[in-house]
Image (cartoon, rainbow, N blue to C red):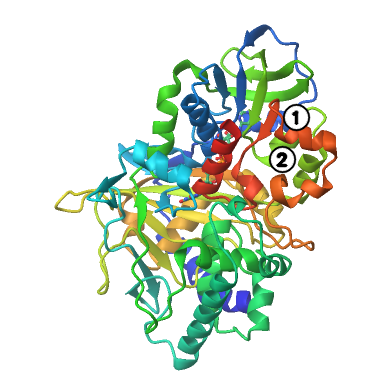
Amino acid sequence: MQRRHFLASAALPVAASVACTARHDIAGSFTGIDHTRGHQLRDRRTWPAPAVTHRTHTVIAGGGVAGLAAARALRLRGQNDFVLLELEDSAGGNARGGEVGGLACPLGAHYLPLPSDDSPDVQNLLEEFGLRQRVAGRWQYDERHLCHSPQERLFFNGAWQDGLLPVQGVGESTLSQYRVFSALVEQLRRAAKWAIPISKTPPAPVQRALAAITFVAYLEQHGLTDPHLRWYLDYCCRDDYGAGLSTVSAWAGIHYFASRHGFHAPGGEAAEREGLLTWPEGNAWLTRRLAAPLGERLQTGCVVLRVAQHRHGVEVHALNTATQQVERWQGQRAIVALPIFVAARVVEGAPEFLRLAAQRVVYAPWLVANIHLREPLHDRPGPAPSWDNVLYGAAGDTLGLGYVDAMHQSLQPVPAATVLTHYRALGDVPGGPAAGRKQLSEQPWTMWRDTVLAELATAHPDLPAKTTRIDITRYGHAMAIPAPSSSGQIGFQPAWNMRKQLSTKEQYSLQADRLRFAHGDWAGYSVFEEAFSLGHGAGG
Ligand SMILES: Cc1cc2nc3c(=O)[nH]c(=O)nc-3n(C[C@H](O)[C@H](O)[C@H](O)COP(=O)(O)OP(=O)(O)OC[C@H]3O[C@@H](n4cnc5c(N)ncnc54)[C@H](O)[C@@H]3O)c2cc1C
């Protein structure tokens, strides 16, 4: 019912407008990720014997936030004898940056909420990078990187409104459902601790119960059927988890609000707008700084093929994509900072907890389109262009999540050329994530160009005419979707979730110095703080 409503109201106008807004002369390409490198692991059975052998103390496999955090933790401990092997030509994983038309833009992750005291590792990192400092006994963040006002707006009923919760012109029944949901979040906030990272606190019984059902089932239980409320909650889930409220667990739906964003019904307690850090190049601002001190210890273009542990150490084989040779790394231990599905493929004799996690994890595919505009867009009356700009009704199937303006933090007095970064989560397309991945691998970039421009043109009719280039980054396995689990298990972290199911030998392999696992996937959902804390723990 919900989905049909959206399709009727949103998809048809978009489809109808493709023909009149498409500009076939707009240049662009797929960019950012070399899929052939990862797919070799899946498609190729045999590899030549290693041509060279290197020795180091610790091998880190994977240079996303988790792998980079592990490297930082090693450095802080004075353990400098390590190597980090990364498949792409630069580190950062989902938090890398690029540029279009000479302007910096994110290729994936683009913001970091101000971390709470539950994330001391992230707080310390921000202090190290000069983003957070103590002034007269109080913590202050660097104003240049705190998201400037206006932060977000929604294109709703043909006009922009402030904030993302639909409020302009909605009826009393909608407002009353907002209040009911807000009260439920508050109640659950008091009933359990909703910390990030989640490993801080073992889940309470109420959280396990929520993890066993879908978010939509929870809303049904509480009679929350209002379409505007449902649209907003669905948007939030797709924006953070890559899939909507029919797919994610009720735990995930509540965690989104209770752990950091809050849910503020109009007329309720006045909410301060959430503080967050953002940069033109997105979270690449952070990952580039994490990678900078590594020097030659960061080996990019290296596809890890095999991780084996034995009594006296570990052995890691990696394909050097520059020389096309397989290289052997011998060390005392390895930190596997790879997505779970890759880890299960490359770790020899994968322990039971890893195999179980790989069977359960479901990945959301994502697409990010960076649209270079030669001049600012005309705007309609209402709130000014914001950092995050979302179109109501764009939900379900293949529709998107609006755009952020990469130049929003710029202090230039007059708006000029910019890059809009459009996000599209494909976890809920008909046929599920596998069908989303198929679309990503089969559709030409021009199809995505025309679809994205047509969708955004509903709010900005002049956008196609002002677009000079559009670059598209595809993530087949972007992030673990926090789907319900019949056992009420949250995430895949063996430390507190699965310890009882581990044999003594496996517990040893998890905790012993030889092999450690770190990646956002282990939290069951993906945000910077989870990936960073897991990596830091593995390297510490
Ligand atoms: C489109 C998008 C937008 C996002 N936006 C945000 C946001 O705004 N804020 C936020 O907090 N989070 C966001 N996230 C979540 C993001 O995933 C996390 O913040 C974080 O970057 C995850 O880091 P990770 O190290 O766990 O994983 P990954 O980024 O997946 O890192 C894994 C690394 O391993 C490498 N690798 C894989 N296979 C191999 C191999 N065989 N050999 C060697 N290396 C290999 C990969 O190339 C990658 O560099 C977003 C994610 C996506 C996809």
Query: Please, is residue 325 above or below residue 351 in the view?
Result: above
> Which image quarter is the N terminus in?
bottom right
- Taking depth in this image into account, of 326 and 179 the one nearest to the observer is 179
Q: Quadrant of ligand 1?
A: top right
Query: Please, is residue 419 above or below residue 32 in the view?
Result: below
Query: Please, is residue 357 above or below residue 254 in the view?
Result: above
* Residue 465 placement: quadrant: bottom left
| Of marks 1 and 2, the one in the foreground | 1
The residue carrying mark 1 has its beta carbon less than 8 Å from ligand 1 = no
| Relative to 254, 359 lies left or right | right
> Could you tell which of marks 1 and 2 lies nearer the N-terminus?
2
Asked if the residue at tag 2 contacts the one at tag 1, i.e. Cβ–Cβ closer than 8 Å, the answer is no
- Kind of residue sitting beneath label 1: Val
| Relative to 431, 66 lies left or right | left
Residue corresponding to mark 2: 341
Query: Please, is residue 385 above or below residue 108 in the view?
Result: below
Badge 1: residue crowd in 10 Å (few <14, some 14–19, many ≥20): some
Rendered residue at 33%/45% (across/down): 280
The residue at the far left in this view is: 413
Residue 90 visible in the current orientation: no
Q: Position of residue 86 (x, y in %)?
A: 56, 27
Say which element carries label 2. Answer: helix
Rendered residue at 62%/22% (across/down): 59
Residue corresponding to mark 1: 347
Callout count:
2
The residue at the far front in this view is: 137
- Kind of residue sitting beneath label 2: Phe
| Relative to 3, 77 lies left or right | left
